[in-house]
């Protein structure tokens, strides 16, 4: 139990390594950008799912209205048979079901248009999420390549990592310009 562990000596100063501070700052900034873009991506995916759910609800409503329309048209056909037995009752029922058919046809079109608009919103949110995902990936790759600079002491890794990170920021920014 008397064994002691020898720890490596820790250098607090960076006088002998001019790369540590600028590369560390670059990596820190890229990490913050990566976290921000990842958050935007998650929110865009959530928004896409929200629109998908609302659109599905509208299509369910559309189907219900289609069923009601079909039933009402069936009743209207039956009214045609009743009309021959009693003209007055037949005309009242025919007028009633004709109005209902018109009502359901109009409602059905409105619901379909609303569902299509929600699907368009869903598609836009999905495209934005894809752009944010791509930007996050480029930022992550750039961050790792910048980190390699600390191990290799080669400036090319730092520049390459910053360029790839800049591509990630630009790619993610395009998500805001989609319409």
Image (tube, rainbow, N blue to C red):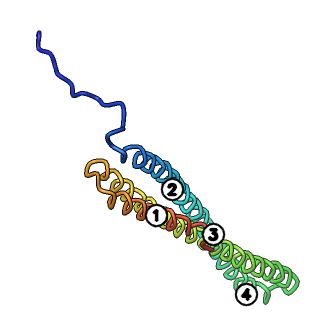
Q: Earlier in the sequence, mark 1 or mark 3?
A: 3
Residue in view at x 54 percent, y 56 percent:
40
Residues at discs 4 and 1 in contact (Cβ within 8 Å): no
Closer to the eye: label 1 or 3:
1
Closer to the eye: label 4 or 1:
1
Could you give the CA–CA distance between mark 2 and mark 1, rounded to whole angstroms? Answer: 9 Å
Is residue 128 placed above or below 148 in the rendered structure? below
Q: Nearer the viewer, residue 45 or 86?
A: 45
Q: Earlier in the sequence, mark 2 or mark 1?
A: 2
- Which quadrant of the view contains residue 43? bottom right
Assign a secondary structure to mark 1: helix
Which residue corresponds to mark 2? 37
As drawn, the label of residue 81 is 4
x, y percentage for residue 107? Answer: 73, 75
Assign a secondary structure to mark 3: helix
Q: Count every numbered label the image shows and give the total.
A: 4
Q: Is residue 178 toward the left or the right of residue 158 in the image?
A: right
Q: Earlier in the sequence, mark 4 or mark 2?
A: 2
Which residue corresponds to mark 1? 168
As drawn, the label of residue 177 is none
Which residue corresponds to mark 3? 118
Assign a secondary structure to mark 4: helix
x, y percentage for residue 1? Answer: 11, 10
Q: Earlier in the sequence, mark 3 or mark 2?
A: 2
């Amino acid at each position: 139990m008397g064994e002691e562990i020898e720890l490596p000596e820790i250098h607090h100063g960076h006088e002998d390594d001019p790369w540590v501070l600028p590369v560390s700052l670059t990596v820190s900034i890229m990490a913050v950008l990566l976290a921000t873009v990842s958050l935007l991506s998650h929110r865009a995916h959530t928004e896409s799912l929200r629109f998908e759910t609302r659109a599905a609800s509208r299509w369910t409503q559309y189907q219900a209205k289609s069923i009601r329309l079909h039933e009402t048209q069936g009743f209207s056909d039956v009214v045609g048979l009743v009309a021959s037995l009693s003209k007055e009752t037949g005309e009242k029922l025919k007028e009633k079901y004709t109005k209902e058919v018109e009502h359901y046809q109009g409602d059905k079109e409105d619901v379909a248009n609303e569902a299509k608009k929600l699907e368009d919103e869903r598609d836009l949110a999905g495209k934005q999420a894809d752009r944010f995902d791509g930007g996050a990936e480029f930022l992550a790759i750039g961050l790792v390549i910048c980190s390699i600079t600390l191990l290799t002491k080669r400036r090319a890794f730092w520049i390459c990592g910053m360029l790839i990170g800049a591509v990630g920021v630009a790619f993610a920014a395009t998500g805001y310009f989609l319409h």
